[in-house]
């Protein structure tokens, strides 16, 4: 599923495809793809410069080292932060104010989460640390996720706990 299909699936307010060009998440991801390419070839300063310009223009901060899959949709986007070692799967939906970042704990191999495919992360949610979020998970708004999450569940709360199992999104 491409970005246009993902947006149409998750946002019923779209009346025409041209409206998709008004989403800041589209531009943040466009700039991120360029910055990530430069980061991979060790042009770190230029990658961070593009990332910083993107953050200024979109209010969405994606570290150039983060790996972001196809069809990811950042809806509204204001205040989204995605850390350097984060991995985000395909066809995910990320709402405003989401942090996908480190937990601040030292001495671990990887500081940031791995997010599976077809995951929905609600507004204000924090997904922190060396954890894995499996495929087809829904994370409720303002939840704090600090432990691995199995597939096909909904989690919510602080700290996040499973509130629904075996759903399909």
Image: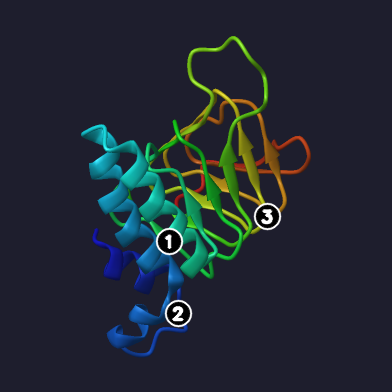
Q: Quick one: label 3, few (<14), some, or many (20+) residues within 10 Å?
A: some
The answer to whether the residues at label 3 and label 2 have Cβ atoms under 8 Å apart is: no
What residue lies at 33% left-to-right and 59% top-to-bottom?
Answer: 31
Q: Secondary structure at mark 3?
A: loop
Ranked by sequence position, the earlier of labels 3 and 1 is 1
Coordinates of residue 113 in the picture (x, y in percent): 51, 31
Residue at numbered disc 2: 12
Q: Secondary structure at mark 2?
A: loop
Alpha-carbon span between mark 2 and mark 1: 26 Å
Mark closer to the observer (3, 2): 3
Q: Is residue 9 visible?
A: yes
Q: Secondary structure at mark 1?
A: helix
User: Front-most of 68 and 31?
Assistant: 31
Residue at numbered disc 1: 54
Coordinates of residue 87 in the picture (x, y in percent): 40, 36
In the displayed structure, 28 sits above or below 139; it is below
Locate residue 156 relative to residue 73 in the image: left or right.
right
Coordinates of residue 56 in the picture (x, y in percent): 51, 64
Q: Is residue 68 visible?
A: no
Locate residue 61 relative to residue 65 in the image: left or right.
right
The N terminus: image quadrant = bottom left
Ranked by sequence position, the earlier of labels 2 and 1 is 2
Residue at numbered disc 3: 124
Mark closer to the observer (2, 1): 1
């Amino acid at each position: 599923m491409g970005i246009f299909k993902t947006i149409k699936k998750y946002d019923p307010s779209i009346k025409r495809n041209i409206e998709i060009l008004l989403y800041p998440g589209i531009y943040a991801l466009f700039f991120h793809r360029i910055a990530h390419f430069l980061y991979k070839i060790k042009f770190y300063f230029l990658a961070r410069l593009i990332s910083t310009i993107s953050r200024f223009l979109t209010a969405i901060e994606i570290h150039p080292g983060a790996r972001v899959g196809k069809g990811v949709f950042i809806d509204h986007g204001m205040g989204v932060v995605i850390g350097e070692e984060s991995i985000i799967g395909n066809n995910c939906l990320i709402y405003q104010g989401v942090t996908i970042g480190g937990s601040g704990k030292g001495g671990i191999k990887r500081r940031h989460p791995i997010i599976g495919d077809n995951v929905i992360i609600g507004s204000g949610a924090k997904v922190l640390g060396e954890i894995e979020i499996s495929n087809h998970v829904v994370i409720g708004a303002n939840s704090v996720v600090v432990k691995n999450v199995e597939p096909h569940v909904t989690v919510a709360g602080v700290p996040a706990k499973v509130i629904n199992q075996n759903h399909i999104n």
